[in-house]
Amino acid sequence: MTKNINFKTVLIGGIAAGLVSGLVKLGWENILPPRTQERDETNPPQQLLAQLGIPKSVTHKTYRYLDHELPMTSYAIHFTFSIVFATLYAALKQYQPKIAAGGGTVFGLAVWIAFHLVLLPKTKTIPTAKEQPMEEHLSEALGHGIWMWTNDAIATKVYQQLTHRQ
């Protein structure tokens, strides 16, 4: 177990990592979209909020930038999820360095399995794993691996710089 953990620095590293990795994941999804256009009309974060009774005026709220309608609520959930998991990962890594296997990619794949193959299908937010196309599995698995690898790299570097550890 690592001693003398600086939790404020873990939090700063997690927030920085989550913001950067959230951008990386969005970029990844532009290259390999994880869902069909039809399923993206109401994406999983929007669907989950709707299942919780939040009205469409909130779940599909957008903002306009350079004549593009961008999904404000989806982005808020996307980045919140990324920050929370980056910070959780950074904290867990201080206690159990083995969690960083594969530079965080194993943890990222575990998050993908937990959410996209188990929890979201169980809540009927997305189709079951068997009903999802293989391209969705490929995009999500690779995207989650790269996402968490980014979290590992950024959170580790921020932690080292702020604590002067190498």
Image (cartoon, rainbow, N blue to C red):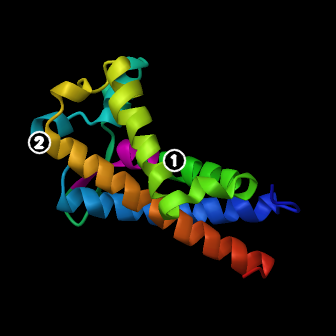
- Identified at 24% across, 51% down, the residue is 139
Is the C terminus in the top left, top right, bottom left or bottom right quadrant?
bottom right
Looking at the picture, how far across and down is residue 84, in whole percent?
Answer: 58, 47
Give neighbour class at mark 1: few <14, some 14-19, many 20+ (Cα, 10 Å): some
For the record, the magenta segment spans 69-77
- The one nearer the camera, 124 or 66, is 124
Is residue 156 rendered to the left or right of residue 150? Answer: right
The label number, if any, that marks residue 134 in the structure image: none
Is residue 121 rendered to the left or right of residue 138? Answer: right
- Identified at 75% across, 65% down, the residue is 9
- Residue that carries the numbered disc 2 in the rendered image: 37
- Identified at 81% across, 60% down, the residue is 2
Q: In which quarter of the image is residue 130?
A: top left
SS of the residue under disc 1: helix
The answer, for residue 164, to whether it is visible in the render is: yes
For the stretch drawn in magenta, what is the main secondary structure?
helix
Position of 48 relative to 4 (above/below): above
Is residue 75 a member of the stretch shown in magenta? yes
The answer, for residue 19, to whether it is visible in the render is: no
SS of the residue under disc 2: helix
Q: What residue type is labelled 1?
A: Thr
Q: In which quarter of the image is residue 105?
A: bottom left
- Residue that carries the numbered disc 1 in the rendered image: 80
Position of 154 relative to 70 (above/below): below
Give neighbour class at mark 2: few <14, some 14-19, many 20+ (Cα, 10 Å): few
